[in-house]
Image: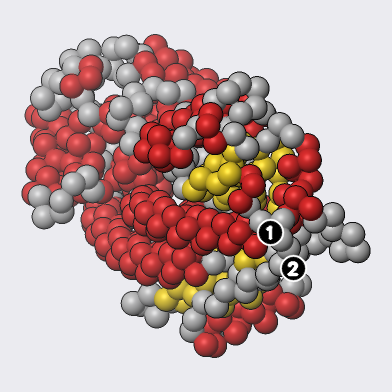
Amino acid sequence: MSNETLPPDEDNWLLDDGDGDVPTRPSEMRKPWKVLIVDDEKDVHTATRIALRGISYKERPLELLSAYSGGEAFQLLRQHADIALIMLDVVMESEDAGLRLVHRIREELANGVVRIVLRTGQPGQAPEQEVILNYDINDYKTKTELTTQKLFTTTIASLRAYENMVSLEKNRQGLAKILESASDLYQLHSLREFASGVLRQISALLDIGTDGILCVRNENHVGRPELEILAVSGAYEYLADKGDLSGEPKLQAIFLQVFREKRSIYQHPYDVLYISSRNRREFAVHFMPQWPLDSVECDLLDVFCQRISAAYDNLYLYNQLRSAQEATVVALADLAEFRDTDTGEHVLRVQKLTDAIAQEMLMSNHYPDLMHREFLDMIGMASILHDIGKVATPDHILLKPGKLDPEERAIMEQHATIGAQILAKSAKLVEGISYLSLGSEIAGGHHEHYDGNGYPRKLKGQDIPLSARIVAVVDVFDALLNKRPYKEPWSMEETMKYINGRAGNQFDPLVVAALSRLVEEDRLPVKFGD
């Protein structure tokens, strides 16, 4: 319900000197309505301030700004996008300065919500009918007709209209931001990354600072705090290493109340949103707007929470699917390991170094079109399938302690094609890029040579999948540094000399360069060699 305070009724506000009245102080808890007085006469500013003293609308006071020319007013409007009402003189630095300002506000600033009341002491300079028809103003008054009572009525009516316009615009922009933010959150693939994204999107939705906390409730919290912090920002960064709210009893009490009552609570400055999901996970988000939220903002946040809940359910299902895929990959790798006792530690080293080289190439902006999120997320895990085709290689060849003869080598080389075919068949059951599709690329291509002299298809250069070009280097690097049935381990110096010598022939030079940097800067992810 509106709280409208009526000033004393005066016959003429220009005669009200305001003696004995105490100036109104802006509320610390309520954002004031900004009213801009634009007039080249100082007495008009003084009289207007006296007439509007003590007025509040919906428990929000007025904040009066002054400009003495159209140019000065325009600069103030650029600085204060939330001015609600402009009381504008027509004749100032020029006979039509006020009318020119109206045009600049609506056209240059594209501000269609601020209410403009034209006040003129020379109505002949700006005939009312002509002005109303040709300029986007909201009211037209001569200075002589604006008594204190009429000025009060005009101000409140203008603020009410401004509030309605802002509500409509907030709804439009807010819903657009919600749709955009939910789309962004659908792309996030970890819970903590998702939590940080939620804080960023709330900040963008309300156009507020970045101070915030997102907690998850651990219902069965054995070994974990009941209220576990997933993300913090701004003033709450100091809580990042603490993990819970035990050091903030007031906040902790509000969070517990939200979880207990299963609803959002708006008790400025302790505003906390409640978000639930289908898999019974519960989250709460605290943020810090400068002013108490209005009903439109609260409604938008309720819609936002529903979209966040759906986005989290999507994240949960995505992670479940990804975990199932990873379990399949590990099971297949275990099958290969069962046949070859050297495979187990080898594939783990290959996985970590493959990830490290891919990240190094990303940092160097190599093949940016290929370094998409799914590729970087999956290539390491997919790399452990590079020799899956060896399950079809006979033991007497796979485990032979010496070098293979030509016939045996031909049989051994079949493992690349066999592995690619096995994984490609399974990959067809999964839409888009997956561990299996990447694994098929790697299995079939990691023995191809950059110059086209490899096997099984003699692919050359960029025709070899990037995933396979990376694993080709990693596989040889690890094989040379470690003991095998047919060879003793090489030194790091010998190994890098061999690999660098084959850059551009056997190996992609950019992959070799990334590995060289990791070696030279001692940034290898695991220990290689004995």
- Nearest to the observer: residue 312 or residue 519: 312
Residue 171, percent across and down?
40, 58
Task: Point out the residue furthest to the bottom here.
Answer: 260
Q: Position of residue 127 (x, y in %)?
A: 47, 35
Q: Are marks 1 and 2 in contact (CB under 8 Å)?
A: yes
The residue shown at (70%, 64%) is 55
Is tag 1's residue or tag 2's residue first in the polypeptide sequence? 2
Left or right: 198 in relation to 423: right
Residue at 66% in and 56% down? 147
Q: Which residue is mark 1?
A: 148
Amino acid found under the numbered disc labelled 2: Pro
Quadrant hosting residue 135 = top left
The residue nearer to you, when weighing 63 against 128, is: 128
The answer to whether residue 511 is seen in the rendering is: yes
How far is the residue under mark 1 from the one under mark 2? 8 Å
Q: Circle 2 sits in a helix, a strand or a loop, which is it?
A: loop
Q: Along the horizontal axis of the image, is 97 left or right of 185?
A: right
Circle 1 — which element? helix
Task: Give the x, y percent position of residue 397.
Answer: 18, 40
For the point 42% across and 53% down, which residue is it?
169
Residue assigned mark 2: 8
User: Of 394 and 94, which appears nearest the observer?
Assistant: 94
Q: Is residue 195 above or below residue 118?
A: below
Above or below 216: residue 127: above
Question: On the rendered structure, is 182 left or right of 20?
Answer: left
